[in-house]
Amino acid sequence: MKHVFLIKPVKDTYDTHPFVPVIKEIMKDYDYEIHFSAYKDHVREIIAQYPEKTRFYSVGGDGFLNQIIQALVSTKHEIVVLPFGTGNDFVRLIHHHQNAATILKESLHHQPTPIDTILVNDAQYYVNVGCFGIDACIANTVHLHNDIKVPKKSAYLY
């Protein structure tokens, strides 16, 4: 099976991420590719290049995972979620730890587990939660204050 890493770049560099060396080390004996998302919904175009069953790896946060899910619903593809976001809510629901390297290694020896999706307003799929009210407001603005030094885990509360 082909393994394809979909990566949300760090700080808009669009070609680097600190997890890439870890991927290369762990995946050295596997058939894999790495793709960086260059713009919103770019992952849809990347996923469309793989008609055969593929295991995709989401290297980003919940918002990036949501973009990927839109392209994977009703396909035979698989998804592994590696935590590199601000909150990583979905990863906290499905894993006992948040160490991306450990999750990647474990995923190579596990069969996929189906997950439910929720279609809202016939337009958008969700796998864990759709934000409403104040939660949605916070989620939409949490990254506007990057100039203030707040620990990543405290960004939501700030």
Image (spheres, rainbow, N blue to C red):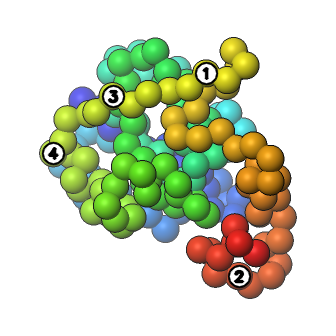
Establish if 116 lies above or below 82: above
| Amino acid tagged 3 | Pro
Q: Residue at x 84, y 64 (%)?
A: 144
Q: Mark 1 = which residue?
A: 119
Going from N to C along the chain, the mark reached first, 2 or 4, is 4
Judged from the image, the secondary structure of the residue bearing numbered disc 3 is: loop
Going from N to C along the chain, the mark reached first, 3 or 4, is 4
Q: Counting other residues with Cα less than 10 Å from the Cα at mark 1, is it few (<14), some (14-19), or many (20 or more)? A: few
Q: Mark 2 = which residue?
A: 150
Answer with the quarter of the image where residue 124 lies: top right
Give the number of the mark in front: 4 or 1: 1
Q: Quadrant of the C terminus?
A: bottom right
Judged from the image, the secondary structure of the residue bearing numbered disc 2 is: loop
Q: Is residue 28 left or right of residue 75?
A: left
Residue 76 position in % (x across, y down) = 36, 18
Q: Mark 4 = which residue?
A: 109
Q: In this view, does 82 lie to the left or right of 2?
A: right
Q: Counting other residues with Cα less than 10 Å from the Cα at mark 4, is it few (<14), some (14-19), or many (20 or more)? A: few
Query: Disc 1 to disc 2, how far (Cα)?
Result: 34 Å
